[in-house]
Image: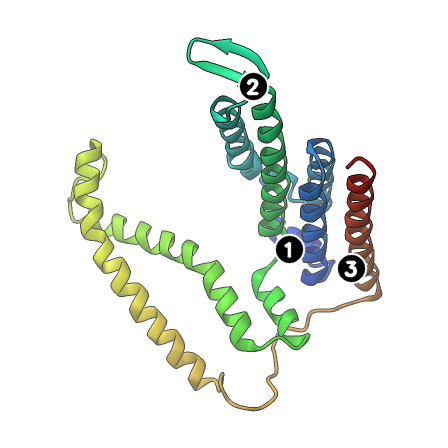
Amino acid sequence: MNMQKETERTQKLNPLTILYIVVALAVISVIYDYKVSVVCVIVMMLVAAGFGEFTSYLKLWSRSILWMCALCFVLQIFFIPGEDVIWKYGVFQVTREGLEQASKLCSRLFGAGSAAILGFRLIDLGNLMAVLEKSGISPTVTYVLMSTANIIPQMVKRMGAILEAQKSRGIEMESNMLVRAKAFLPSIGPLILNAIVNAEERAITLEARAFSAPCRKTSIKIIPDIKTDKIIRKLMIAAVILAIGGKIILWTAFK
């Protein structure tokens, strides 16, 4: 029941509208400095909270982007050379140039990565592909995009099933790294073969449903695109244009 409520909450907006919001926040956070990136990430968290996904978004964000940015920042400040040394201890030193480069790179990674996670949590890929097809994009393109996005989760799920089958046969899977590697490597063969068979079965299924037929396709999914969606998309486009224009003005003024 709770999952149904969260799904209904997410579907209040058209998936294309959510994509516009995610892309706009990502672009704005990338073209400006870390201060704007932090503000954009706060906005992303508010958006996630509005869709009832704040807790899951925060957990995924803190386990991935936060640690990635922290590691990247440390590596950047210690290994980018420079002349203006701020801090030094033995062979390690922090320079002003390294600090500036680390701030630029990590702020972009921080904003773009946070936006990608927000899109992953809020956008239903099947609904988005249906909307894109309705807007005129080729079904072949949407199928390739959807298959590419789903390939990693499917492979992980299949690998889990194979490993569980190996455990049920009495094969040691939870010892040291060498034992795990010996058990893991033979599992790759069935995984690859299974992926090839599934790809062939999927292609046959699509052809049986007239996927490549030269006619107008119909869809079982009817996704509403109300006036609010169109207004939000126009606002996101305007926000990106204003952000890019403001960046150009600032760059010209302080050049």
Locate residue 252 relative to residue 218 in the image: left or right: right
Name the residue type under label 1: Thr
Q: Is residue 98 left or right of residue 155?
A: right
Q: Amino acid at mark 2?
A: Glu
Image position, residue 73 (x, y; %):
54, 27
User: In the picture shown, does residue 61 fall above or below 132?
Assistant: above
Residue bearing the label numbered 1: 7
Give how far across and how far down residue 169 sits, in percent: 16, 49
Say which mark, if any, is on residue 233: 3
Q: Relative to residue 110, is residue 130 depicted above or below?
A: below
Provide the secondary structure element on which disc 1 rests: helix
> Mark 3 vs mark 1: which is more N-terminal?
1
Q: Earlier in the sequence, mark 2 or mark 1?
A: 1
Residue at position x 82%, y 60% in the image: 234
Q: Could you tell me residue 159's position as x and y percent?
A: 31, 52
Secondary element at image label 2: loop
